[in-house]
Image: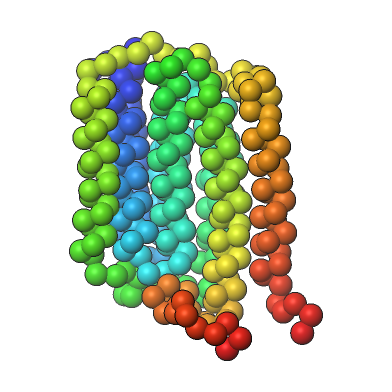
Amino acid sequence: MTASDVMFVAVGLIAVGAALAVVLTEHLVRAGLWLVLALGAVAVEFLLLRAEFVAWVQVLIYVGAVVVLLLFAVMLTRAPIGPSGDLDRPPGPALLVGAGTGLGLAGLFVWVFAGKQFEPPPVGTAKALGNNIFDDWVLPFEVLSVLLLAALVGAIVLSKKEISS
Amino acid sequence: MIRPVIPLVTAALLLGIAVYGVLRRRNAVLVLMSVELMLNAVNLILVTSDTLRRTLTGQAFSLFVIVIAAAEIGVGLALVLRLFRLRNTINVDEVSLDENPAN
């Protein structure tokens, strides 16, 4: 175990623990705040993997925008302060499928990659990533801009009070 | 040197926890939070895959996934607020799928 491995394990434990708190807590607002910790820990993993630009985009978009939107939604749907008792379904099927997915995938990864080590990749700076996107992935980039516009219009139409009546 | 197995196992566990959350939670906002966790687990796998192949393609794709997640959360929350305005609840178990939408 090198220092980098210890960092990966520690940050990974924080991410998994915070994610568990998100799906187990009885407080709606606290679930959103635990989500900040989980997404922040994943951003640190990105930094450890040398994906510098993606890490900062993660902090800006996820921890900044998405969590604020979710907390707004919690507020606008008049969520109660304090624990809510009726947030969950019976646990059986969810536990089966969730544990199957998580442990199955984890087992597969351990089976394939256990003990393998790789050189650190090139640092994913904004410049390198921009060159990569605009050399190889221009069409998906443009399609995504249309998708964002469509989502914007859709969200506005959905949240209008009533359309022409 | 980087051991890719550690972030990959982290991502797998995050994905499993998120699947559990999506299936277990009844509140629509909490379901959307679990979906965000799921997309994040996929991003972690994409970024880790760059370590194996020494490219930047996975990071470019994880940026695309982040953009799609932002679009998804915007439309998703608009739907949730609409549902709350119609029914005064966001409990997804109480939404019947075969109901006449005019009522």
The answer to whether residue A131 is seen in the rendering is: yes
Q: Nearer the viewer, residue B26 or A37?
A: B26
Where is residue A163 drawn, in percent x and y?
75, 77
Q: Please state the horizontal and vertical placement of residue A34, each as a whole percent of the image.
A: 40, 52
State the residue at coordinates (53%, 21%). B56
Residue A6 in view in this figure:
no
Residue A106 position in % (x across, y down): 25, 36
Q: Quadrant of residue A132?
A: top right
Which residue is at a point 41% across and 54% down the rendered structure image?
Answer: B34
* Residue A10, quarter of the rendered image: top left
Q: Quadrant of the N terminus of chain A?
A: top left
Nearer-the-camera pick, A104 or A27? A104
| Relative height, residue B9 to residue B78 (above, below) | above
Q: Name which residue lies at 55% across and 41% down.
A: B66
Q: From the viewer's perspective, is residue A72 above or below residue A20?
A: below
Left or right of B89? Residue B101 is right
> Residue at the location (38% across, 10% down)?
A119
Q: How many marks?
A: 0
Q: Is residue A159 left or right of residue B60?
A: right
In the displayed structure image, the side of residue B70 where residue A29 appears, left or right: left
The percent position of residue B16, horizontal first and vertical second, equals 30, 47
